Image (cartoon, grey):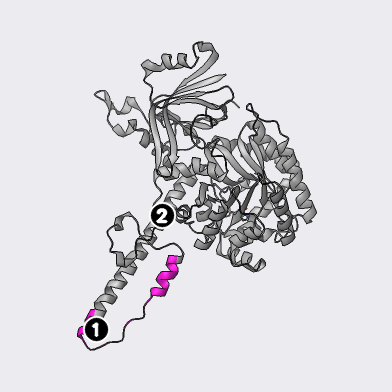
Amino acid sequence: MATIYYGPVINPQSLTDYLALPKCLILVSAKGDIDRIYEDVQSSQLQEILAQNGYTDHSAFNFIESREGEFLMPGFIDTHTHACQVPNLGVGGEFELLQWLDNYTFPTEARFKDAGYAERAYPDVVRRIVNSGTTTCCYYGSLHLEATKILAKLVHDRGQRAFVGKCNMNRNCPPNYIEPSVKESIDTTLALIKYIEELPKTSNSQPLVHPILTPRFAISCTEELLERVSKIALENPKLAIQTHISENPSEVELTKSLFNADSYAQVYERYHLLRNNTILAHGVHLTEDEMVLIAKHGAGVSHCPTSNFYLSSGMARVGMLLDHGVKVGLGTDVAGGYSPSILSTIQHASIASKMLAIQAAQAADKKCNRSRDRHRRDEEADSEPSEPSEPSDEVESHSHGHHGHHGHGHKHHHHEDNCDGDKKGPGGFTNERLSIAALLYLATLGGAHVCCLQDRIGSFAEKKAFDALLVSVRDETGNPGVWGYNTARDLTDGVTAQSADRSMVEWLERFLFCGDDRNIRRVIVQGKMIGGQEYQH
Ligand SMILES: O=c1[nH]c(=O)c2nc[nH]c2[nH]1
């Protein structure tokens, strides 16, 4: 049955713009695609517009009208998470990546050898991720075929849009959690691809769940294994690829030495694993040359700031990636990340961008002061007998610059040019805070681009799938962190005391920064409710 939605809608447009439409009408077909969008419809016009579109018999369609304090927005796209690490949420954060893998992650993933455990654990995993508002998810399973089939089937049956892959890993892993041979790794990979491709299609005969090649990371794959994965990739250009890149300094060094390569990205390029449907998780320590290489191949980066903070990996230079033309989406990276919700990722992406902006401003200040001091000393030296000068730390300043700490934040817009504090890329994102529009974009349309699904999802547009969240920031949701919409409390003389309560822009911000699953009434994929507070299990 078709469904008609009427009320406030948030619609991402670009990194700098989104629409907040208080009276939007969206007509969704029985197949779950968006037929028509009317951006501004007064309630007095409703019947006429519905009739024009053939909706006269009210028993033949659902009509859902949002109330004040509620809005529709596109569903979140999680471009990187590990389903088999959900049991580890919130533990192990005292380690850095390589020790964390050995001490926490590999032992937990090893349990999925037991298909019975996968049967018991994965339903909880999928339920939590769906109820967090993730309508599309890029899942890493463990290295096990059976467990990963169970995951794919559960995701499919639930109706979530997803990519599901099993890890390829045949070295630098513990004896009880390693693939015994290249052949086994490749055979099980091909078997999973076939299994997923044969799952029934959706109502519009397109698949919701896609297979994805998942060479875990370069360190865990021998050259022979990467060659064989590469062969599968070359034979299947539409097959997506996911892996990790440049998350942690020790990981970067080990990768370069194992593969005798100048850079991490070069290793993946060598094996033809950089292409437009490749998702590279983390990218914290990418050099600008690697960013250029990644952009040249059209690959995307999954920004995982919760994990990057939790495992002390660092802060990815998202603004610089964007300025280099790299596609960027967000990833929860459970359980390097300790939350299955993209809302947490949004909050940490915001904080990371502010930290980078602050550091850049401080570096620019320092450099500016030094150049002013030097100038003053030169002037004094001209007028006085010469003194030994202090050693210059220009070199230190440059190496900071290499790590993206050039430039400055907003408060330094008036710096003089000779302080070199204004190094920004063409898009102006380098070293700048991510705006609400940018955060929203990364969590939705940016993620869709990373998944090469931008023609289907990520925003509301005619002919796209209706993948959406019905959000509520009304007080009755029970989330104490949200100062919710409540006319009984805030209405004075016929208007809300805080006009903020009526502003959709602020509803959105409150949700992004203070919301949780209590604020998500419905999670909708391809027009069908698959989760949220109103979902009947
Ligand atoms: O955050 C991460 N989580 C993982 O499971 C992993 N494996 C390789 N590199 C990784 N990074």
Of badges 1 and 2, nearer the viewer stands: 2
Question: Label 2 sits on what residue type?
Answer: Pro
Residue in front for this viewpoint, 36 or 59: 36
* Chain part drawn in magenta: 379-401
Q: Does the magenta segment cover residue 244? A: no
Residue 242 is left or right of residue 64, and the answer is right
Of mark 1 and mark 2, the one earlier in the sequence is: 1
Task: Report which residue position mark 2 lands on.
Answer: 426
Hey, which residue is sitting farthest left in the picture? 383
Q: Secondary structure at mark 2?
A: loop
Residue 38 appears at what percent x and percent y? 43, 25
Question: Label 1 sits on what residue type?
Answer: Ala
- 441 relative to 37, above or below: below
- 348 relative to 171, above or below: above
Task: Report which residue position mark 1 lands on.
Answer: 381
Q: Does the magenta segment cover residue 391? A: yes
Find residue 524 and name its label.
Answer: none
